[in-house]
């Protein structure tokens, strides 16, 4: 998959592009992407996705609580898995935010990306103050012979498929319901960073990911599956701040079963399977070790189902 991160890179004209934020890449997003892929095949072209980074909501509300279902690295992983051929990341800055609907479409989409077809969801808005709607999009694109396709509201079990609804389910700890809306396990892709090696010292080494931009789920322990270089491993993760060690740094710490390789600096994908317990502070390392052993047994039982 070609990843385009700046306007100096050349994009082959005539592509079929889905345009939006695609946070979480849920089933509603996947419907838009499937239509883009099908259209590209009919047009003997290629399918791409255009997103904004940072998410406009984050740009305008820098101090708001974290809400990402998928950061840009995770989003790239999910889109690549769906067979998207070109992933365009538009830098959402003050200059982008100030563009009128016409300026955004004409100067960014048409001049730089040169699509033949644009596909968006029914509620897509664009331009300064979200002034542009799908009728504006159709009008502007028609002047440049660009076809616009609109994907109507999608539902799963009578519930609207939306990133907001997925966030609510994850915050409530209902990972199975969230999975139904996503069409996949909720997952995080990140680069393993150095910790203070406390886990290694007590016999439970961990692969640590920084998760500051992601939606804040319940602090606690989860049964997980981890993909490393295309191979899947079982594990148990702690999502939180490690109160036993008076921690403040938010981390996803994952202990992999039957694994001893050095993976510092490598990208891994952690998929959340089931919640086990809330994070708690223990009165001593021995009690913590006993609990981690029990958590590991529970995780193994869950993952062996």
Image (spheres, helix red, strand yellow):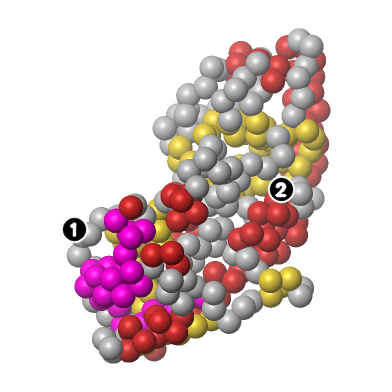
| In the depicted structure, whether residue 142 falls above or below residue 289 | below
Identify the residue under disc 2: 171
Label placed on residue 287: none
Q: Is residue 230 visible?
A: no
| Residue at figure coordinates x 46%, y 51% from the top left | 60
- Which residue is disc 1 drawn over? 8
Residue 21 spot, x, y in % from top left:
47, 62
* C-alpha gap between disc 2 and disc 1: 40 Å
- Where residue 295 sits, quadrant-wise, is top right
Q: Could you say which quadrant of the image residue 256 lies in?
A: top right
In the drawing, does residue 201 fall left or right of residue 299? left
- Find out whether residue 112 is within the magenta segment: yes
Q: Secondary structure at mark 2?
A: helix
Q: Earlier in the sequence, mark 2 or mark 1?
A: 1
Disc 2 crowd, CA 10 A, few/some/many (<14, 14-19, 20+): some
The quarter of the displayed image where residue 12 is located: bottom left
Q: Position of residue 268 (x, y in %)?
A: 50, 42
Mark 1 neighbour class, 10 Å CA radius: few under 14, some 14 to 19, many 20 or more? few
Query: For the N terminus, which image quadrant?
Result: bottom left
Residue 11 placement, left or right of 127: left
Write the start and end of the magenta stretch as one range.
95-121
- For the point 56% across and 58% down, which residue is it? 24
Q: Is residue 300 magenta?
A: no
Q: Please name whichever residue, 210 or 272, is drawn nearer the observer in this view of the structure.
A: 210
Relative side of 276 to 61, left or right: right
Which element is circle 1 on? Answer: loop
Q: Nearer the viewer, residue 101 or 105?
A: 101
Q: Is residue 78 visible?
A: yes
Q: Nearer the viewer, residue 52 or 71?
A: 52
């Amino acid at each position: 998959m070609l990843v385009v991160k700046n306007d100096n890179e050349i994009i082959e004209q005539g592509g079929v592009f889905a345009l939006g934020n695609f946070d979480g890449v849920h089933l509603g997003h996947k419907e838009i992407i499937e239509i883009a892929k099908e259209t590209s095949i009919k047009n003997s072209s290629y399918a791409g996705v255009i997103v904004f980074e940072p998410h406009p909501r984050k740009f305008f509300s820098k101090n708001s609580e974290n809400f990402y279902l998928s950061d840009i690295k995770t989003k790239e992983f999910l889109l690549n898995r769906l067979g998207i051929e070109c992933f365009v990341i538009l830098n959402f800055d003050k200059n982008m935010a100030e563009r009128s609907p016409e300026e955004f479409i004409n100067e960014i989409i048409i001049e730089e990306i040169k699509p033949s077809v644009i596909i968006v969801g029914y509620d897509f808005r664009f331009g300064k103050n979200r002034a542009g709607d799908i009728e504006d999009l159709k009008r502007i694109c028609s002047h440049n012979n660009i076809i616009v396709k609109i994907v109507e509201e999608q539902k799963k079990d009578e519930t609207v498929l939306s990133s907001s609804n997925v966030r609510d389910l994850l915050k409530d700890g209902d990972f199975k319901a969230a999975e139904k809306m996503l069409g996949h396990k909720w997952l995080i892709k990140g680069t393993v960073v150095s910790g203070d090696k406390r886990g290694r010292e007590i016999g439970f080494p961990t692969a640590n990911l920084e998760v500051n931009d992601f939606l804040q789920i319940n602090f606690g322990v989860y049964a997980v599956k981890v993909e490393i270089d295309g191979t899947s491993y079982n594990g148990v993760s702690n999502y939180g701040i490690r109160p036993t060690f008076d921690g403040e740094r938010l981390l996803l710490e994952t202990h992999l079963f039957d694994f001893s390789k050095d993976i510092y600096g490598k990208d891994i994908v952690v998929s959340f399977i089931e919640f086990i317990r809330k994070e708690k502070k223990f009165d001593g390392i021995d009690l913590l070790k006993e609990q981690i052993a029990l958590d590991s047994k529970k995780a193994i039982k869950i993952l062996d189902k």
